[in-house]
Every structure is written in structure tokens, then in C-alpha cells.
Image (tube, rainbow, N blue to C red):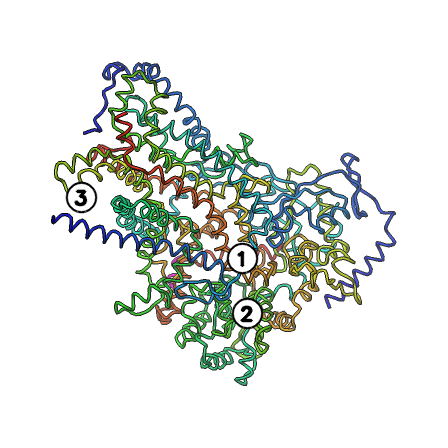
Amino acid sequence: MHETIWRKLFVVINSVFMLFMIVICLYPMLYVVFVSLSDSNLFAQYTGFLYKPLGFCLDSYAAVLKNPMIGIGYLNTIFIVVVGVSLNIILTVFGAYFLSRRDIVVKNAVMGIIVFTMFFSGGMIPTYLTVQNLHLTNTLWALILPSAISTYNLIIMRTSFTALPISLDEAATIDGAGHFRKLFYVILPLSKAIVAVMVLFYGVGHWNSWFNAAIYLNDKSLYPLQLVLREILLQNDSQNMLQGAGNVEDSMKIAETIKYAVIVVATVPILTVYPFLQKYFVKGVMVGALKG
Amino acid sequence: MKNKIQKNTYVSGGKGSFAARFASDLKVNRAAYIMIIPVLLFYIVFAYSPMYGVIIAFKDYDISTGILGSPWVGLANFKSFFSSMYFGRVLKNTLTISLCSILFGFPAPIILALLLNEVKHKWFLRTVQTITYLPHFISLVVICGMIKNFTAQDGIVNYIVEFFGGTRSTLLMNANAFVPIYIISDIWQGVGWGSIVYFAALTNVDSELYEACTLDGGGRIRQVFTVTLPGIMPTIMIMLILRLGSILGVGYEKIILLYNPTIFKTADVISTFVYRKGLVESDFGYATAVGLFNSLVNVIFLVGANLISRKLTETSLW
Amino acid sequence: MMKKTISLLMSVAMMACVAGCGNGQSVRSSDTGSYPKGTITYPMDTDVKLTYYVKMPSNISTIVSNYGETKFAQESMKRTGVQIEYIHPAQGNETEQLNLLIASQNLPDIVETNWLKRDPDGSISKNVIYKLNDYIDDYAPNFKAYLNEHEDIAKSVMTDAKNYYVFPMVRASEKLLNTSGFFLRADWLQEAGLSAPETIEDWDAVLEKFKARPGVEYPIAVQMDSLKYFTGAYHTAEGFYVDNGKVKYGALEDGYKQFLQKISEWVGKGYIDENFPIMDFNTMNAKILNGSAGVSFGAGGGQLGTFLKTKQASEPTYDLVPVPFPVLKKGEKSTYSSRQLPYSPVSAAAVTTKCAQPEIAVRYLDYAYSEDGYMLNNFGIEGESYEMKDGYPTFTKLITDNPDGMAMAQILTTYARSTVEGPFVQDERYIEQYYHLPRQKEALEVWSQNDYGSHAIPQITLTKEESSEFSGIMTEINTYVAESITNFMLDKTPVSEYDTFVKTLHDMNIDKAISIYQAAYDRFLTR
């Protein structure tokens, strides 16, 4: 009796807290949308709380979307994300499976080799030379292969595999399953949530990255979206105008707001991915698997 | 208890030399070794083959001469970092920011995930999840622009300060306010995104355990502490170990956008200091040496944390 | 004066061309080994194709995807007969990309970048780029003639070892060097019955009046970086400068203390927004536009001109007047300003050792210094982008009032190089037309009235050892100075503690840094 009152109170407080989270986390995105639709000059002078666009001006969107490179950028990015994430997932799953096996004698040594690379790397120049020797420069593979595994993600996935009940593995062994069979028919079906997380982490990583593209690509037709957007931003950077080179009057109008329009253009597609992945974050899958 | 070490059923209990055990393991677990081959290949090609670049830290590196051709300078690059009059200050600031961020920033996504776990309406749950992860996608330039706006003399934060009897001031020119601003904005931007990992881990907690707990007459709170938390503890511990392994990794991007000379006292960290030196002259040797120092400290923390975690929770990287 | 000389030269050259065309020597790349030296007529008869690394001008990056598509590049290729394949680094990552190209020994034939920052003598001795002295003698008669006529420029573009390493950009007029400065609300001055301020005393009077105006929060809206120009009134400068052949460091001088005193007084009186250390570029511009401030600092094109154009459309009385850099007594000239040096090293072209036929590359680059090339680089194509009116190259409507609505700078960048940095001699008649408002023309005049030209440190070069010692000292000093002077200006540290500050600077080895610069400066003088 007593318990349910507290329970109800908790549900109310928790709901209020969640509403609070919605407000403070939704606000920045709304703010971005508001600013992207605002008049740049009005915005620059404004310091208070923004709850609607200041004026209304679509120039910054026009400046972004009229760029012929946007379409190419989207296509390249989609290719990189699809191919890149597929490779990421395959390698990460293999690596995580190996490292989660308690019976493998060199498991810790391999872990050591992998963790070591989180701290020590050759830096930009030797890495570039490696990529160049493989003749990957100026191809999209230069953006996919060198980032085929994130050690951080690999460790997270291994942790998730390790947390699965050992009894499942024992049962599969008794049934005579080999490693590939165990991985694909026992472990992966129970790891949908973590695979979804990995798809999200790797996908967003590829989606947002631009630095490798900036150093490995010369051919503009290979530019991913983020690099195209970066060029648009630099072109409209008001500080550039100091050199008398900028497209002065036009830039002035959208100097501030274009940064925000770029965020909207760049993030809306990737944001829509998450709700699709959410369905894998469901509890109770395990019970069914265990009984079946 | 369910994390019991599995007895190796194939290899006779640790007898024989390592080579013999490895050979037998290769035979028995051949399929697993096949899986790891492409993974190791990746690490060999893209991580280990360029690793000779680390020696730049001990060289007076000149791009046109190449890494191997540049003259050795011993520890000169390290000395020039350690002997800087700002070394103490930037190290202290880096550690302060990092420790505060672990203390306050690390638990935040866990708490959010646990609270989300208690939300029963599916649509509400999904809405909250989707919205809390939005700020992660806003670029730092814009986030910092908002921070500047909110902490300005007539910004929204100052309304709150005034409400509680304080006086309005430009908070980004107040050295004492920098660390809180940095940490709070970090949590705000990262809590939803950070909770995703824990939320995925929660799906792995066996529902039968919940039922068992309820049958035992355990309340919700007891359930959280006896079932939920232990269920995601391995994930928590691994995330904590990894976090401690980047204790000196406070990046310069956000700070460069927020700081100014009036708050160097608390805001200048290792990476920003090196960044400013880079503006004077692009000195690869120096930057690599500082990077190596950071890595060594980070490794010490990681190994230490791993050791403690293995003793206390049986969870560890190796 | 300058203008006349150039036009005269031009007409002589044009006659020479008319007379000389057809019977000059021509270059054939198939004549293995020996290329004709001395003067030639373009186009060359060659099938050599050169690769050319250059930053894509950001204002046309959305119009063309490669610089080779511009009218300018196509015309240069046609006129010189050399095919150029342009290679562009990703914008904002020029330094990294060039580092990687050098490290991977994959350099294009010609590379435009800031070679002065890349140890020119070292780059020559390590076989990254060619030493150009002999090539210039034999294959760059136009550039050689220019260097012979301009000894000061020649000194700047050579190294201490008297090596030539690039084809430089030269800004051949004071007007091109002084394109930013202070400006004030002219209409407010008029209402207050004041004239444009020259001395610090004038400034005090103006600021007092401005401060009293309704709606004005702080009269001066500038970023921290611009306050340093007030040092010129106190016979010193920011950072290193030369005074009668002696290198000095501004913050050590007595005048600097007075400067800090003045700024902190103005901050105290509310003349300067105390938030200047975090003042945003766009916020600053907004303040001068909306009238909450009446004084700002900026470029004649990007700021002064834009503000007048945007604002006067809706508010005809709005007016901004450019003022000279402030001084202490009437008739003096400020010892510090934003004046740039005539040789701009930012985007100078070097020929790399990967180039198999450096003679052709040198010939190609030399064209920009010929009379025809000079006109092409500055004004574009005669009859298309400019017309000669009374001997004055006047931009056509295509440029000044583009039918497709492109901004002048943008369309001009596709026809000429005058809007961006590059290896050629820049003509002031470009900026005279680019700055077409009377206030902008006035700005070029008044901002030029300063004496920083005789105080600025020229393009000195440090040896590798000097350079690493210097950067070690200065990284710390820059941090310390930035922190300290901000505190002085905001009166968080009283100016009475200035002597302690100076003493600390000495302890931090500023004198060593000065002597390194002094030695480099002395070497410069003996070039």
C-alpha cells in the first residue's frame, strides 16, 4: 500500500523530469532552426532568449542548397556510410567475438595489441604515407578502410558479448555448434540492441567526419557532404571579407545564420535514422531465446 | 555468479608450454582465429605500420628531410614542455576539468538511462530518447555560440543568477565560472547520446531476474540495486576504465571557442597551449612529445583503473 | 606619380609589342636541353603541361570547381601557350595538405603558398624547390627588370643567402597597403559640432559626446585586437618593431604603459565595452550598424563600405567617416597601424624540384610581370572586363554592375587576380574602383597617413636554431602578455604594477628574443 503511493509519486516526478529533459534538449535544436530562418543582422544584435525566428529570411538556405555540390556530397556520404558501416560491423563483430571468448589463450595479448593503439599512433604524416602506398588516396576507400574499426566501439561490443549468459554458449557447444554458428545463431540474435548502437555510432561517425576527406581527396566530385558544407561555411565566413575578397554584401546578410542552416541540412537525414533503430532497444528478447 | 569463468573443455588445464597450448588452441578454435585475422590485419596496416612516427617526439622533425632523416634531439622536446612556466598551470587545469567531468559528467547518462528504464509508456520513452540525443548533432561552433549568448550579461543564465540574489556579469570573463560552464554544457550536449550505450546494456538484463526479485517481495528501488545496476555494471566499469584512459584528453576545439585571456587562469589546458604554440610555428616534434606524455599518463590511469576494476568487480579489459 | 610612371611604361611596352610581335624568339620544348634565353614573345610553342597547386579563391568556389575554368586561367594559358592543370587543397586545410605533399614527395610543378614560413633557404638546400637566381637571369626578363627597378622589393623577396625562391605578390602602392582603420559616425560628429578626431585629446572629447547620446551603451565597439592601434599615438607599437635601426618590443616601452593607462581609463568611463575580450566579429558589426556604438575598426571594403551601403538605403543620414590612426600631438604621424608590407608572402609561387622543365614554369610565371600580364592579372581581359578610358583601365558594367547579380569581387575573381593574393604586381587602380564610395576613397587617403612603414619589421628570415629558440620564448611571452594587458585594460591589475610586468618579461628572456630579431634584421639590411 505504502509502496504504491511512493511508486506513483516517483512516476510523477520522473515524468516531470523527463519533460524537463525534453525542453532543455529540444531547445537547442529549435534554436538552430529559428536562427537559420532569421535575419542575420537582427540575430547578431540579439542576446536574449530566442523563441521564434527574428524576422524571416530563407537566404541562408538558398545559399546552401543552390550549391551544385550538395547533391554529390549527399551521394558520396551515403556511399561511405553504407559501405563503411557494413565493414565496421563485420570487423567489429568478429573482433568482439574473438575477444569475448574466455577459452582463447592469446585473448589478452590480442586485447593488449588493440588497446595499445588507442594511445600510440604514428600521427598524420606516416598514416598518410601508408594510405598512399596502398594507392587509396583520392578514392573513397581512403575514408573507409583506415577507419574500419574503432577500438572504443570494439571494446563496448566485446563487453556486451561477455555479458551474455555463459549457459547459452555451453548449450550451443553441446549441440556441436562451431564458432561461426555460435556467433550468427546464438550471439547476434541476442545482441540486436548493441548492434543497433554500433550502427548508430559508426554511422554518425562517418556522417560527420571531414578531416580525412580534406587530406586524402583532391577530386571535388568525391567530396562528402561535410566537406562541401565546410567550403560553403568558409566561403561565407565574415572574417574572410577582411581581405576584400569576399562576396561582401551577400555574405553579410547571412554571415551568422548560414552556420545554422548548414546544421539543419546536414543533420536532418541522420536524425531520422535513430527512431528506426529504437525498435531494437526492446527488453525481453532474451527470455524467448532462452526458452526456445 | 553468472559471470563464472568457463572451464576450457578442450585444452587440458593449463599444462604444457605456451607454444603448445597456443598450437592446440589454434587447432580447436580455428574458426575464431579466422575471424580475428582481418581485424589484426587492419591494426597492423593502419595502426602499427605508421607507428614509427612516434619517434618524431625525439627528433627535430623537418618535413622535407623525412622522419627517418631528421636529426635526433633526445628529450629536448619534452624538456621544453616540462620547463615551461605554464606547464604546472595547464596540467592542473586539464586535470581539474577532466576530473570534474568524470565526477559529474560520467554518472549523468547512467542516471538518465536508469530513469528512462522506469518510463512505461512506449511512445513517451521513445520521444524522450530521440529528443535527448539531438544536442549531440549540433556543431561545437554553434553550441559555443549559444553558451556565449546564455552566459552574457543579459543572457538567460544571468536571470537565474539575479533571481537568487546575485549580480549580473559576463560569466565567460569570470575565471571561477569556466569549469562549471564547460562541464554543464558538456553534460547537456552529451547526456542523451551517452545514455544509448547503457540503454542497450539494459536490454541484456534478464527479465527473469526481475520476476525473481519481485517474487522475493523486492520493491522497485531494491530491484534497481539488486538487478538493474549489477546487470549493466560490466558496461559501466568498462566505460569508466576507458574514460580514465583519456584523463588528459581535454580537446582544444571547445575551449578555443570559449576562452579569452581573462580566464586563461582556469581555462588554458595542455591542448590549447600546444595549439597556441602551433600558431607561432608548426612544431611537429613538440606536439608529438606532448601527445606522447599525454598517452603515457593516460595509459597509467587506464592500467590502474583496469587493475582495480578486476579486483573489485571482476570486469576488466584483459 | 606612380600611376603616371606605370601608364607611361605601359604605352611604351605596347608600342614595343606592336613592333616586336612576330620577330621575337619562340620557345620550343622539343629543342632538348637548351631553351632560348632572354626576351621572348608569347605564346610559347610548347606542349608542356604543368601542374599548379593553389588555394581556390573562396568567393568563387561555388561557381567553378577548378581554377582552370576561370576566364583568367584560360586567358593566361592561351597567351602563354602553357597548359596548366590546377590542383586545389581542401579549403581550410591548405597547410596540412601541403605538408603531406612534401612528405610524400608528390609536389606539383608550381606551388603557391607562404614559402617564407617554410624556411626558404632550407627548402632550396633540401631540394624541395629550385633556387631561382639563374633561372630568373635567363628566363624571367620581366621579373628581373622589375627587381632591378625596385631594390627594396628585391631585398624582401630574397633570403639572407641572397637566394630567390618565389615569384611574389607585390602591392605597388601605399593605398593597397592601408585598407583598414578606424571609422566613426560622421552624422553624430556633425551634430556635436566636432570634427573628425586626430589626437587622443580629440578622441576624449568625441567619446564624451558620443557616450552622452541616448541609445549609446559604449561608444567604441572593437575587438581586443584593434585596441592595439592606439599604441601608435604613444610612439610605440604592438609586438616587435624597428626604431632607428633598433628592434624594440612594444610592451617594454614607456609609451605602452601610457597606452594601457588610457585604455583602462576609457574602459572605466564606459567608452569601451568591457566585454571587448570576447567581442564577436558579427556582434561588433551589428553594434555599429544599429547605433549602439559610434566607433569601430575594420576594412574599407568588407566593413566601412558595406555598412554605408546597407544602412544609407534605409537611413540616409547615417554616415561613417574614416579617421587617421590617432596621435598625441597634432601634425604627428602614428608609429603603428595596420599597414601591410609591400611584398606579401602569403601566396607566392615557387617552382618545385619535381618540375622537369623549370625553364617553362619560370617563363610562365614571368608573364605576370610583363606589361600584358600585368594588365591581365589586375584588370582581366580588355574589352570584356575592362576598357581603357583616357589611359585608365576602367572596369566594364560586367564587373561593376553584373547582370547576373554577382558581387564585384566575385566576378572580378574570375577575370583577374587582383582580388586575391598571387604572384603578380598589384595596381592601385583596381582598389580605386573597388572602393567606389567617396568615404572609401577618403579612407584609403587618411589610413595611409601613418609612419608604420618606417617602423615595421620587414620580411626577415630566422635560421632554424633561432626560430626554435624564438618560438620557445615567445609562446610563453605571448600568453603572459595577452593575459596581463587584458587585466591592465580592465583595471583588474592596476597600471602601477606595470614595472613588475616589465621585469617579468625580462625574466622570461624577452631580451634574447629581441636580439634574435635584431640579428635577423641586421642580416636583412646587408642583403
In x, y percent, where is residue C468?
Answer: 47, 48
- Name the residue type under label 3: Arg
Instruction: Label 3: state its secondary structure.
Output: helix
Q: Report the residue at 57% width, 43% height from top.
A: A72
Residue B220: numbered disc: 3
| Secondary structure at numbered mark 2 | loop
Q: Position of residue B301 (x, y in %)?
A: 28, 40
Q: Is residue B170 magenta?
A: no
* Residue B124 or residue A228, whichever sits in front: B124
Task: Say left or right for C256 vs A163.
Answer: right
Is residue A286 shown to the viewer in this render?
Answer: yes
Would you name the residue on which mark 2 appears? C335
From this view, report whether residue A245 is shown above or below residue C328.
above
User: Pointer 3: residues within 10 angstroms few (<14), some, or many (20+)?
Assistant: some
Residue C95 lies left or right of residue A278; in this view the side is: right
In the structure shown, which secondary structural element does the residue marked by tag 1 occupy? helix
**Protein chain holding label 1:** A
Residue C505 colored in magenta in the image: yes
Q: Position of C313 compared to A124: left or right?
A: right
- Chain ID at mark 2: C
